[in-house]
């Protein structure tokens, strides 16, 4: 990147210099053409003067030369004899007769030429005209512009170029270095060698700031997605481990009791009934686990169907009736108070209340209570059971998460009920949380966003 910026920087300077040189060359060519026009006009005028008066050619040569200094006027015969010359230094006649403009004048009557015979710094415009076939009028006009260009303008152009390089380096080098550094920060951030906290978009140039903010947003999203993927993978591993264990434990018990019944055909009726009771209990436990897994799978895949106005008081009383056998075993009183109506699929509300109320009965105290409190847009399920410690509250809605695995298995829990409840509330845009302290019971609260 830095090499490209430096290349662009030098190309820009070179183009600027080229433009200046081309401009100077165009100006020079324009001046030369102007001088050519002036020289030819002087030649035509001088030829008329010579025709009218040729008695004193030297005086006439000086007069013509004085009209446009530093013009040099020479009168020369076709045989090479110089009759008059306004210059201070003598010219070589033979050399003068071989010049292009003189040759053209002898051949066509008039000629002109651009000459570098003296030196590169002293070029001249030359013109000649044959007068009456017996006299040649020769004009030579040094071009001072080229001398000025080489001796004055060219050094100024060089100095200007050097000054431009110095100013560009002074002004642009810090900018390019900062831009390169900022782009390197972006690269390091994408590669992960720079921390997200070390990048502040406000320190970037305004032109780069929106792109940097967008990059940071995408990186944050990517990192968030990676964290969620990692959590999902952990949950999947826990799901497989726990579900395997949950199914393996009752199967082991069933296999053991079945083998005892098979190996001891003379077993007494009371003991046989006891073993069959254990087998039946473990089968019911397996059925409960499979039903919860299937319910969780259906909840994950189910889309919100046609919703209707659901009376949660009525659904809660139906769930309470269904849970009455379990509640009677622990002498737990289930009460439903208040009214709440929501737009939902009734089966989803049944599953939500069944899991929350069933969880409260399962972990409730002997002789305790479960209260369902309803208000518009709000559902609360309270119990006075064993409660939940603070460190477990954030994770109890994860699949198969258990506060105490031994206690949960004894209570017949699968660790999926609260995960199912959380999935239902999330699907309806509702929020669920728990308030609890160890030994003081728990209160699960659902706030519905969509309410009647």
Image (cartoon, helix red, strand yellow):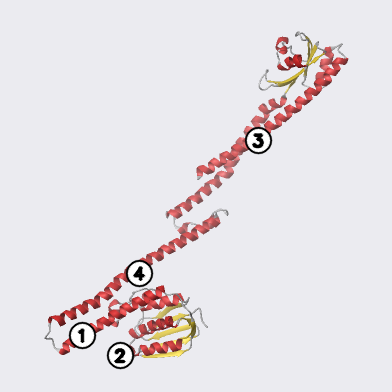
Determine the image quadrant of residue 104: top right
Work out how far the residue at label 4 is from the one at label 1, CA to CA, in angstroms.
35 Å
Work out how far the residue at label 2 is from the one at label 3, CA to CA, in angstroms.
102 Å
Mark seen at residue 329: 2
Report the front residue among 39 and 100.
100
The reply, left or right, for residue 79 in relation to residue 163 is right
Label 1 sits on residue: 276
Label 3 sits on residue: 20
Which tag, 1 or 3, sits closer to the chain's start? 3
Above or below: residue 53 compared with residue 307: above
Helix, strand or loop for disc 2: helix
Which tag, 2 or 3, sits closer to the chain's start? 3
Label 4 sits on residue: 235
Above or below: residue 96 compared with residue 3: above
Which tag, 4 or 1, sits closer to the chain's start? 4
Q: Can residue 278 be seen in this view?
A: yes
Report the front residue among 236 and 291.
291
């Amino acid at each position: 990147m830095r090499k490209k910026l430096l290349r662009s920087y030098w190309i820009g300077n070179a183009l600027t210099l080229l433009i200046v040189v081309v401009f100077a060359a165009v100006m020079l060519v324009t001046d030369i053409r102007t001088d050519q026009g002036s020289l030819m006009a002087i030649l035509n005028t001088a030829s008329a003067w010579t025709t009218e008066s040729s008695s004193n050619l030297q005086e006439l040569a000086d007069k013509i030369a004085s009209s446009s200094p530093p013009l040099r006027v020479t009168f020369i015969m076709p045989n090479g004899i110089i009759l008059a010359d306004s210059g201070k230094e003598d010219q070589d006649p033979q050399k003068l007769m071989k010049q292009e403009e003189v040759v053209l004048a002898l051949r066509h009557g008039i000629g002109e030429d651009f000459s570098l015979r003296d030196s590169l710094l002293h070029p001249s415009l030359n013109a000649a005209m044959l007068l009456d076939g017996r006299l040649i009028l020769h004009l030579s006009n040094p071009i001072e512009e080229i001398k000025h260009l080489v001796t004055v303008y060219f050094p100024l152009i060089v100095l200007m170029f050097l000054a431009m390089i110095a100013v560009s380096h002074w002004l642009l080098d810090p900018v390019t270095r900062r831009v390169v550094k900022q782009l390197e920060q972006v690269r390091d951030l994408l590669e992960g060698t720079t921390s997200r906290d070390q990048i502040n978009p406000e320190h970037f140039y305004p032109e780069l700031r929106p792109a940097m903010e967008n990059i940071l947003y995408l990186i944050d999203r990517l990192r968030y997605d990676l964290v969620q993927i990692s959590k999902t993978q952990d949950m999947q591993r826990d799901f497989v481990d726990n579900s395997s264990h949950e199914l393996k434990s009752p199967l082991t018990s069933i296999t053991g009791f079945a083998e005892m019944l098979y190996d001891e055909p003379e077993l007494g009726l009371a003991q046989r009934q006891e073993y069959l009771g254990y087998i039946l209990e473990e089968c019911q436990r397996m059925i409960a686990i499979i039903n919860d897994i299937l319910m969780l799978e259906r909840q994950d895949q189910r889309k919100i169907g046609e919703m209707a106005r659901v009376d949660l008081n009525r659904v809660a009383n139906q769930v309470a009736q269904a849970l009455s056998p379990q509640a009677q075993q622990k002498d737990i009183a289930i009460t439903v108070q208040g009214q709440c109506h929501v737009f939902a699929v009734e089966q989803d509300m049944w599953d939500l209340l069944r899991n929350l109320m069933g969880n409260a009965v399962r972990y409730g105290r002997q002789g305790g209570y479960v209260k369902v409190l309803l208000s518009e847009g709000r559902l609360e399920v309270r119990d006075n059971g064993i409660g939940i410690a603070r460190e477990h509250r954030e994770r109890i809605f994860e699949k198969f998460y258990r506060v105490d695995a031994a206690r949960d298995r004894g209570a017949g829990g699968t660790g999926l009920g609260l995960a199912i409840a959380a999935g239902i509330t999330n699907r309806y845009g509702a929020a669920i949380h728990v308030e609890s302290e160890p030994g003081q019971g728990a209160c699960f609260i659902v706030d519905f966003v969509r309410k009647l």
